[in-house]
Amino acid sequence: MDLPYFQLTTAINEYVAPALREGDLDSCIHWADVMLSKVPESPFHLIRELDFTTCPKDTAEKFDRWALEQEKNKLFGSVYTETNGFAFNADQWHFHWFAYGSRPRDQNYDYLGEGWISEDHDLIVLTGMEDLQKSFQSDWVDEEDFARDICECAVVFKLMRFVQSVATRMKHLRYPLVVSSHGWDVFLAISPTPKAEQNVSEQPATRF
């Protein structure tokens, strides 16, 4: 994986995409750790020591309340969530839920450009990365660009792992849940929990 910096996208497609399709976020995060180990130390290396601390149980309960309210008048095909942009929103990282009438098919997510059908909801604030957010808020030298890019990958993968954990606690996930970050074209798709009307907090969400 000792690749030229400009080949980052190729590296993601070759090394990360297969693991992502299987929902293996630990392998994706390990890949980012290995890539960071190949470049000089920078403030962005802090990502290796951090993870999100937002409560998965509370987040799942917020989703269930929102989903039940939205489903009264709409038929969902899927739900999408993404973080806000890291650099331009370094003071706070958060995400929203968006419901769509369409479903992802064969790893095709073009329908996300069609516009969502749900109403807005309270944003979910992501905690645990505040020290790292300061690095995105500050100026960095050109030599740190690659470390920053890999750091963003790791943040997204850790977000995906967090939402993956949230999904196991959802009682009303009756449609695919797609996860990404603003401006990204890398996605994690989590399929509906097997018994959406029952307590599935101990049952992992399956993937398709």
Image (spheres, rainbow, N blue to C red):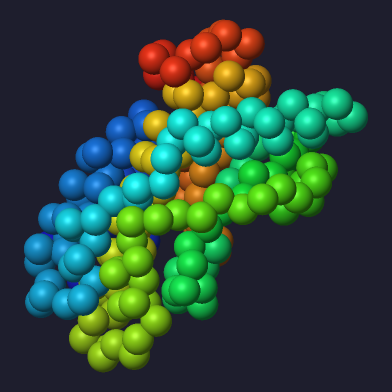
Q: Residue at x 28, y 64 (%)?
A: 150
**Quick check: can you spot residue 200?**
yes
Q: Residue at x 79, y 31 (%)?
A: 69
**Quick check: can you spot residue 18?**
no
User: Residue 108, located in which quarter of the rendered image?
Assistant: top right
Residue 207: where, in percent of width, then height?
46, 23
Left or right: 177 in relation to 112: left
Left or right: 79 in relation to 70: left
Q: Residue at x 40, y 32 (%)?
A: 165
Residue 98: where, in percent of width, then height?
69, 45
Q: Residue at x 18, y 68 (%)?
A: 45
Residue 197: where, in percent of width, then height?
63, 11
In this view, the residue in front, 199 or 161, is: 199
Residue 112: where, in percent of width, then height?
69, 48
User: Residue 102, located in which quarter of the rendered image?
Assistant: top right
Vertical side of 174 occupied by 199: above or below = above
